[in-house]
Image: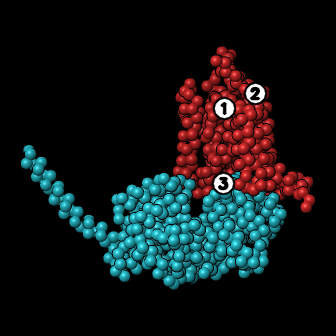
Chain colours: A red, B cyan
Amino acid sequence: MDFDWLFLAEIVLAGLGAGGLYALTGLAFVMIYKATRVVNLAIGEMLMIGAYLCFGLATAMNMPMWLAILVAVIGSGVAGATLERVAIRPMLGESPISVFMVTVGLASILVGVVELIWTSEPRRLPEFMPSAPVMIGEAFVPPKVFYGFLVAAVLIGVALAVFRFWRGGVALRATASDQQAAYSMGINVPKVFSLSWTVAAMIAAIAGVIVGAVGGISSTMGVFGLSVLVVVIVGGLDSVLGALVAGLFIGVVESLAGGFLGGEFKLLATFMILIVVLLVRPYGLFGTHEIERL
Amino acid sequence: MRRTVLKSLLATAVLAATAGLPAVQAADKEIVIGGSIPMSGVFAFAGIGIHAGIQDYVKMVNDAGGIEGHKLRYVPEDSAYKVDQSVAAFKKITSQNKVNFYYGDSTAFSKTINPELDRAGTMIMSGASFATELNDPKKYPYQFIAGPDYTQQFGILLRYIAKEKPGAKVAFVYSDTEFGRDPIESSRGVAKEMGLNVAIEIMTPPGAVDVSTEIAKLRRARPDFTIFHGYILGPIPEFIGQARQLGLDTKFMGTFWTMDNSTVMQMGDVAEGFMGVMPYNYYYDTATPAPMLDKIRAMRPEYQNVPYIQGFLSAMLYAESARRTIAAGKEMTAANFKAALNSIENFDTGGLIGVPITIHGNTIPVGRIYRADTKAKRMVPASDWIVLE
């Protein structure tokens, strides 16, 4: 029997599509970690809040979808800044595990908020992406996955440019590499913290809207964050490049495992990679190898 | 001073004793329905409906004078759809009340609490689970399902398919959960017996967002019918959307928890033609006389979901078991309740189910195929009632 190359191509493309979303959410995670050293377990729930905000604005308030997305992204940014100010900043200087637990609690609270306002019934975001099938050569790519990938790629490009050239981005990188030095150079470090949470929440909201458009929204959609956690650990918690590469890599591996072995092997493949990477490079593929001298 | 205190103590004691008398008598003349109900958490959309259904039936019976001189009393606790919380609720309710019937919220709870039910021997239980495993009267003597189990739901779908298109190619798409895997293995054989060809089985990981990989597989199998199981809503709409974009000519079907009217209508345009099995009439069904649905509509003018109907029917079956047990002059024990339940033959549910029901084992193996009409925003019947032997 001939090997079905078209099947392989479709599966790899599907994997890249999913990987784009992993990379985008991973970017939001890394941004917070890089600037504030907080392992934010609530990233999946922040993504969920963005999607629900968009849903609420588009359905209950009848906003056109583009406006709903815009307002939801800005709203999520404000929520991100507020969370940082109220829940994270008071924890400055506390042990990392305490801050980590605060984010676990935060995730729980965000799920509760969603269930209180929108109940736990699964819902659909209004359709807003073109529905004409996209063909790359002979391979079919679902339009939502294709456009979702495009949006993710553009956003990642913008984020990288901002990091590189904008003053705020430079301040963020400076804070990430050495907080004390950043302080002494006149950088407003608390403001950088706030900025990182704001931007990360906005990126997560966009990822949430795309994930919601593809798979629907529910109060359990935060589990998407679990795969993202694997992505950032594999890529290196503080590496933007790592999040991008690992996002695409995990996406493709999951898709290949699902396509050739079966759906039950998707998560198995993901976590096998996690274990191998942790054994070989505990700081991730591209993460900073910190050497502690005793 | 001392005398006053003594007097007041004595008065309180007398009051308590005399007040206690009628209470004890009333307690003897009541039938208690306990329930671990998922009023919060991920399953709350169903729990709220179930709760309202049981509550309404209990009220209806009590307003009409109760059952053979007994009042029904419903004692629910929120379980948040967590097994430990459900068990805690069970312990609390059964320790404070003489419970005769119990509503459980999940398969896991039904399995966990089963030894407790066997030991107590005082109550029978049904719940939100349609798990095939529970349809074993030897292993689960004091439990039942107020509808067909998942394998029977597949059986009803497959029988419809075999009639519509003999020898059809069928795909099973299911989630990698206990719920999703439940009917797959047993239904493979059922399909074969009916001369159907299970062209592909696709398992999706829980919480899967994108289904492009699965669609690539489905496209190659080209099934005539695709049955989803183990989901509420997502990722079904995306599946159907992508299949339509590819021009796949397959009919999509679902099982009970996907089939509520509001759930299917949330799929939007892709819902058109979506089919599935439903053991009950929908709230708005008026094609056949259904006095019980009329009463429900009079009590609650707004749409009630299918978990409501399931809760309502469960309470009706509890009451019927109790009625038969008391009428026969038997003691109110689990064994007698279950025997009474199993004596139900050609029982009229007042139109909740479109045909008279008979409960031989632990289930009611009845259902009908419905199809989504997105213009009318309703599920409309696509078949007659199908009763499995």
The part of the image, by quadrant, that contains residue B284 is: bottom right
Classed neighbour count for the residue bearing mark 3: other residues with Cα under 10 Å, few (<14), some (14–19), many (≥20) = some
Task: Indicate which disc residue A166 carries.
Answer: 2
Nearest to viewer (mark 1 / mark 3): 3
Left or right relative to B23: residue B244? right
Residue B160: percent from left, percent from top: 69, 78
Secondary-structure class at tag 2: loop
Q: Residue at x 77, y 58 (%)?
A: B214
* Above-or-below relation of B167 to A248: below
Q: Any mark on residue B152, and which?
A: none
Q: Residue at x 30, y 70 (%)?
A: B28
Secondary structure under the numbered disc 3 in the rendered image: loop
Locate residue A71, reporting x and y percent.
66, 44
Q: Residue furthest bottom?
A: B346
Q: Position of residue B341 (x, y in %)?
A: 46, 77
Determine which of the numbered discs, if any, sits on residue A33 in the image.
1
Looking at the image, which residue is at 54% across and 47% down?
Answer: A112
Q: CA distance from mark 3 to mark 2?
A: 40 Å
Locate residue B61 relative to residue B28 in the image: left or right. Answer: right
Question: How much space separates mark 1 and mark 2, taking CA atoms?
Answer: 19 Å
**Residue type highlighted by circle 3:** Pro
- Residue furthest to the top: A184
Residue beneath disc 3: B206
Give the residue displayed 53% in from the left and 64% down from the top.
Answer: B128
